[in-house]
């Protein structure tokens, strides 16, 4: 970690109370730790918006009895090529399957891949979570 700098922040008391409640629930030791994480999260989003290389997980829940859906999911992963690093699926019940796909690539490619999957009929829910692939990724 680099040299620390102190800053002051003014907030409405109600907003600060809500923030303190959230950071307590998440187990932060103090406000500074929580604010540092918020800033890091924002910086990652900015990098992602600039179409940097990112890594991400696409988590979906889908009906694996939906005709052709499993084949469409496999095909989408194959089209992304070597950018799919891993995948895992778990049967939740008779109809529902949870699948997690780990991807690495340009943010636009990763987001397009996720949007294509999430829009398929039979995908009940899903979320893409992305982060920076690191300072030295090109």
Image: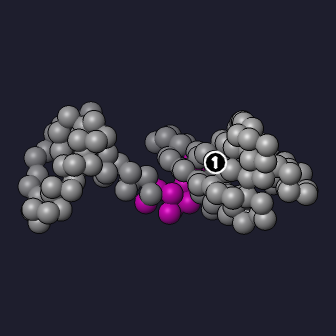
Specify few, some or many for label 1: CA neighbours under 10 Å numbering under 14, 14-19, or 20 or more: many
> In terms of depth relative to the viewer, which is nearer, 4 or 90?
90
Along the horizontal axis of the image, is 52 left or right of 14?
A: right
Which of the pair 19/9 is nearer the observer? 19
Q: Position of residue 76 (x, y in %)?
A: 81, 54
Q: Is residue 131 above or below residue 48?
A: above
Left of 20 or right of it: where is 41? right
Query: In what quadrant of the picture does the N terminus appear?
Result: top left
- Can residue 10 be seen here? yes
Q: Is residue 1 magenta?
A: no
Q: Which residues are magenta?
A: 46-54
131 relative to 65 in the view: left or right: left
Position of residue 87 measured from the top left corner of the image (x, y, whole percent): 72, 38
Where does label 1 land, which residue?
59
The answer to whether any part of residue 112 appears in the image is: no
The local secondary structure at tag 1 comes to strand
| Percent of width and height locating residue 124 | 69, 58
| Residue 47 lies in the magenta-colored region | yes
Q: Residue at x 8, y 55 (%)?
A: 8
Q: Residue at x 31, y 51 (%)?
A: 38
Residue found at x 30% / y 52%: 39
x 27%, y 36%: residue: 27
Rendered image coloring scheme: one colour
Viewer-proximal residue, 98 or 135? Answer: 98
Q: Position of residue 131 (x, y in %)?
A: 50, 47
Q: What is the total number of numbered labels drawn onto the structure image?
A: 1
Q: Is residue 34 above or below residue 110?
A: above
């Amino acid at each position: 970690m680099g040299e620390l700098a102190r800053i002051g922040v003014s907030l409405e008391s109600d907003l600060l109370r809500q923030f303190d409640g959230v950071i307590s629930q998440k187990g932060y030791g103090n406000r500074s730790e929580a604010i540092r994480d918020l800033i890091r999260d924002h910086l990652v989003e900015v990098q992602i918006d600039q179409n940097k290389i990112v890594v991400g997980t696409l988590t979906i829940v889908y009906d694996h009895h939906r005709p052709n859906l499993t084949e469409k999911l496999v095909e989408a992963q194959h089209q992304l090529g070597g950018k799919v690093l891993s995948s895992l699926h778990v049967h939740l019940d008779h109809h529902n399957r949870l699948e997690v796909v780990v991807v690495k690539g340009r943010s636009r490619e990763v987001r397009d891949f996720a949007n294509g999957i999430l829009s398929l009929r039979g995908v009940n829910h899903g979320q893409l979570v992305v982060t920076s692939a690191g300072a030295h990724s090109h």
